Amino acid sequence: MANLHQPAFTIGVEEEYYLVDPATGDLATDPPEEMMKALEGSAVGVVGPEFLRCQLEIATPVCGSVGELKRALTDLRGMVGEVTGRYGLAPVAASTHPVAAWDQQQHTDKERYNFLANDLQGVARRLLINGMHVHVGLEDSELRIDLMNQITYFLPHLLALSTSSPFWRGRDTGLMSYRLSVFDELPRTGLPQVFDSYGEYERHIEVLTHCGVIEDASRIWWDARPSVKFPTLEMRITDVCTRVEDAIAIAALYVCVLRMLYRLRVTNQRWRMYGGMLINENRWRAQRYGLDEGMIDFGRGEIVPYGDLLEELLDLVAEDAEALGAEQEVAAARDILSRGTSAHMQRRVYRQALAEGCAEEVALKRVVQHLVAATVGRDGG
């Protein structure tokens, strides 16, 4: 095997938020242009519109450490909360809005979004969902493909820690991540294809671009993919986390798993590959149950409690967490397990309101109020 230069393992996060009226909990279907200009002009990070006008997308700078990422993402959320608050609005970091109707939203008038709306039609119009994407710097193209093939095994584990989309159009879906059900209606989604080399990946992309099916590889929306813009491996499976500390924990765990896989590679080892059919079962279990009903341990051939799997994973990446200075952030995954994800918290708020005699619409409004507070760290948790 050719010698590899140590990857940078730089890290960056993109998150999508709803814009809501905190008094009513309703989406802001027509946010003020002045507010958008103020957000886009921020020096804290990149802020811009998303597919629907009621959404925002933020992106941290490229960060050299998890600690730097934590500061950047916390500052970005604080800035967004402060600027939107001037206009009577607030950000919500959740992957579905508990009550909003997708057919009442308008997409952003930009060339890229106009093309998507025309190309995907009703599938695109239902995309009232938010996600979190984590980029990790891997400069070598062949390494990106090799680690993409292997990271697939761990993607359901990361999804389970992030779930924040139990409600859809005023109903409890019974799923912890209903967002994934909506997103999977798009073409070119799901687990990534396995490739023998970066050249094979490029040839597959060339078939689709040559035919005019896609403009470039940014139209490939797999759960993990080589980024088109940056020399990174981009993880896309996760819901957006309502609590910023959960987002940091998941990002830290992702970069540590990639470093662990890289360590195996330089000693001519690798993670065992399992078929997509099997990994998709764990993907579904994470989507449906989150942390609650365990996942399949393919080596043992049985369903194992998520807590056991998490401890095994933390042991696997302990050396990497230490090397990257991310021990505290990675260990915070245990806090998610003990406290629950945003999906758990949303259901608790909803059920408590019903137990107090509130009508369903009032209970759901309380969920939105909780999300507003938790997004910027004012929920007391």
Image: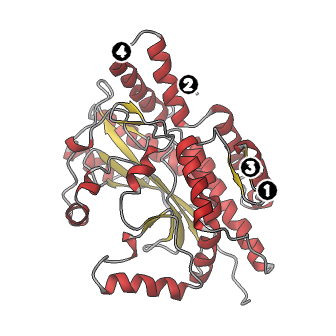
- Secondary structure at badge 1 equals loop
Three-letter code, disc 2: Gly
- Give the residue pinned by disc 2: 380
Nearest the camera: 140 or 191?
Answer: 191
Q: In this view, does 27 lie to the left or right of 307?
A: left
Q: Which of marks 2 and 4 is in front?
A: 4
Q: Is residue 78 left or right of residue 106?
A: right
- Secondary structure at badge 3 equals helix
Q: Nearer the viewer, mark 2 or mark 1?
A: 1
- Give the residue pinned by disc 1: 300
- Does the image show residue 73? yes
Which comes before the other along the chain, label 1 or label 4?
Answer: 1
Expressed as whole percent of the image width and height from the top left, the position of residue 225 reads 50, 69
Q: Which residue is drawn at 38% across and 31% down?
A: 171
Q: How far apart are marks 2 and 4 (CA)?
A: 25 Å
- Give the residue pinned by disc 3: 309
- Give the residue pinned by disc 4: 359
- Does the image show residue 378? no
Q: Do labels 1 and 3 touch, CB within 8 Å?
A: no
